[in-house]
Image (cartoon, rainbow, N blue to C red):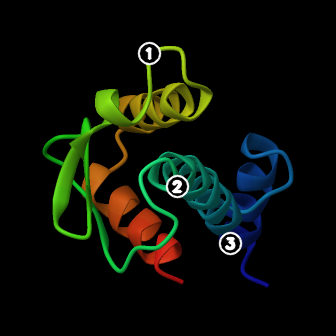
Amino acid sequence: MDPLKELIESLAKLEFGGMTAEEKDEDITKQLAGHYLALIKGVTDRFDHVALFADDLTKIQIDGEIYPLTSLAADGDTHRSEIETILSELLADGEDAEEILLAVQEYIHT
């Protein structure tokens, strides 16, 4: 194995508690999707399309209807708080909001 690749993998395991960067990304995507789905289920049990917006993290589109997160969940709602916390941490770390939200959308639609 390439020594540089081994070093990168071992650093990733240290930083992410034994997970590779890809596994960590997938875990974060699943967590966010789960929280979004909980909010969506408050509106409808069945939907065809969900869109999330990198330019406005405070809204979600469900089957063409746009909802502010504030109308889907109160300030103290666990799911809303987790979405806001996870996204703010990722963005503070320099992650791309559009890339994150596209992955979450894809996960929701599977």
SS label for mark 3 = helix
Determine the CA span between mark 3 and mark 1.
44 Å
Q: Are marks 1 and 2 in contact (CB under 8 Å)?
A: no
Q: Mark on residue 75?
A: 1
Residue 81 image offset from top left, x and y in percent: 52, 25
Determine the CA span between mark 1 and mark 2.
18 Å
Please indicate whether residue 69 sits to the left or right of residue 106 in the image.
left
Q: Residue at x 44, y 30 (%)?
A: 73
Question: Which residue position holds label 2?
Answer: 41
Q: Nearer the viewer, mark 3 or mark 1?
A: 1
SS label for mark 1 = loop
Q: Residue at x 63, y 60 (%)?
A: 30
Residue 88 image offset from top left, x and y in percent: 40, 29
Which residue type carries mark 2?
Lys
Name the image quarter holding the N terminus.
bottom right
Which residue type carries mark 1?
Asp
Q: Mark on residue 5?
A: 3
Q: Residue at x 63, y 51 (%)?
A: 31
Q: Tell which of 91 and 31 is nearer to you.
A: 31
Of the numbered discs 3 and 1, the one sitting upstream in the chain is 3
* In the depicted structure, whether residue 32 falls above or below residue 23: above
- In this view, the residue farthest toward the top is 76
SS label for mark 2 = helix
Picture mark count: 3
Residue 55 image offset from top left, x and y in percent: 13, 45
Characterize the local packing of mark 3: few (<14), some (14-19) or many (20 or more) Cα atoms within 10 angstroms. few
Of the numbered discs 1 and 2, the one sitting upstream in the chain is 2
Q: Residue at x 34, y 67 (%)?
A: 102
